[in-house]
Amino acid sequence: MANTTFTGNVRANGNGNRANYAGSMCMVAQFHVPATNAAAGTDAQVSANDTRTVQLPKGAIVDTIIFNGQAAAGGKIDIGFADLIDGVTFVDTDGFVDNGAADDAQEMILPSSATAGNDLGLTEMTHDVKIVAGQGAAAQAGTLTGTIFYHMVDDGKESA
């Protein structure tokens, strides 16, 4: 079990006032792309040594992605998602990053970024999904490691 795993609800009503709106909590998932020149839609993995897929739950909304690519000069990367049902029901292989710089540049992709995909900050995952990545417009060999910041949809009401 991970160090930060718990089963209780996280609420931040502020000043102990339960009438205040309790917003969503930001969560973080690390990911690694072992080959930036792999075909678009290739599974990302947890780390260079941990080959498990990076999975996000139904209801997640990806807000920001930060990554550092080690591809050869001019390398571009697409980062998106594919559902865990069959990999074709709910898919957008460049939904979060569309032709981001994968070549030794630290990138922070916000919804307003030129290389932000159409789903970044907007689309609620309607299925459990895995993170996928692969070559963008210019394929160059290398690796890439990053962090995904996301939140879960929350109506702000106190749990029953």
Image (spheres, rainbow, N blue to C red):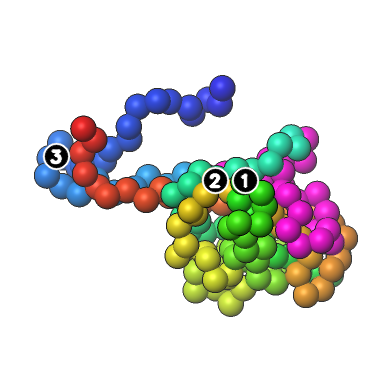
Contact between labelled residues 2 and 3, with CB atoms less than 8 Å apart: no
Q: Who comes first in sequence, dot 3 or dot 2? A: 3
Q: Nearer the viewer, residue 90 or 109?
A: 90
Q: Secondary structure at mark 3?
A: loop
| Residue range highlighted in magenta | 29-49
Q: CA distance from mark 1 to mark 3?
A: 37 Å
| 4 lies above or below 130 | above
Q: Which residue is mark 1?
A: 84
List x then y, in percent, for residue 61. 46, 55
Q: Which mark is residue 18?
A: 3
Q: Quadrant of residue 140?
A: bottom right
Q: Does the magenta run of residues contain 13?
A: no
Q: Nearer the viewer, residue 131 or 63?
A: 131
Q: Who comes first in sequence, dot 1 or dot 3? A: 3
Secondary structure, magenta segment, majority class? loop
| 157 lies above or below 109 | above
Residue drawn 26% across the image and 41% down it: 12
Judge left or right: residue 121 versus residue 144. left
Q: Does the magenta run of residues contain 47?
A: yes
Q: CA distance from mark 3 to mark 2?
A: 31 Å
Contact between labelled residues 2 and 1, with CB atoms less than 8 Å apart: yes
**Callout 3, which amino acid?**
Arg
List x then y, in percent, for residue 89. 61, 56
Q: Nearer the viewer, residue 84 or 19?
A: 84
Q: Secondary structure at mark 1?
A: loop
Q: Who comes first in sequence, dot 1 or dot 2? A: 1
Q: Which residue is mark 2?
A: 128
